[in-house]
Amino acid sequence: EVQLAESGGGLVQSGGSLRLSCAASGFSFDAYAMAWFRQAPGKEREWVSCISTGHGSTHYADSVKGRFTISRDTAKNTVYLQMNSVKPEDTAVYFCAAGPITKWPMRDATEVEYWGQGTQVTVSS
């Protein structure tokens, strides 16, 4: 059974930091690109960042570039999203996603094969 289990969400003050984790199981983690998406209330789900397999090339949405860092630990089958200098507009449910490397760069929800259940991040002003 495929599972993507996010953790690390919560309430943080504006300017603070938070690290999200996503533990993957049930598929070949090494062969999949990983990504984070987010969805704020009343808005469509939007892509945040993605990381490839191997040397781990990364891409970021302009809204988070320079503040967020995506990384992956192959030994732990886990992908992370380090969120620094957070802003109230970062408030959303954050979803971990996996897609075959043939879909690289994975920036669109239609390219995702597996989704996590989401973790809430709330940034207070």
Image (spheres, helix red, strand yellow):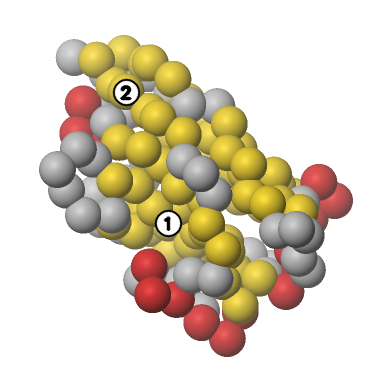
Quadrant in which the C terminus is drawn: top left
Look at label 1 and name its amino acid. Answer: Ser
In-image side of 35 versus 100 (left or right): left
Residue appearing at x 23%, y 40% in the figure: 40
Q: In which quarter of the image is residue 67?
A: top left
In three-dimensional space, the C-alpha distance between marks 2 and 1, rounded to whole angstroms, equals: 18 Å
Q: Of all residues shown, which one is farthest toward the bottom?
A: 102
The tag on residue 92 is none
Neighbour tally class for label 2: few under 14, some 14-19, many 20 plus, Cα within 10 Å: many
> Would you place residue 3 above or below residue 9 in this image?
below
Position above or below: 54 against 3:
below
What residue is pinned by disc 2?
122
What crowding class fits label 1: few (fewer than 14 Cα within 10 Å), some (14-19), or many (20 or more)? many
- Considering depth in this image, is 53 or 21 the residue closer to the camera? 21
Q: Quadrant of the N terminus?
A: bottom right
Seen in the picture, residue 62 relative to 8 is either above or below; the reply is below
Q: Nearer the viewer's eye, disc 2 or disc 1?
A: 2
* Mark 1: secondary structure: strand
In this rendered view, identify the residue nearer to me: 104 or 23.
Answer: 23
Q: Nearer the viewer, residue 70 or 5?
A: 5
Q: In this view, does 30 lie to the left or right of 97?
A: right
Q: Is mark 2 on a helix, strand or loop?
A: strand
The label on residue 49 is: 1
Residues marked 2 and 1 touching at CB (< 8 Å): no
Q: Residue visible at 27% across and 31% down?
A: 91
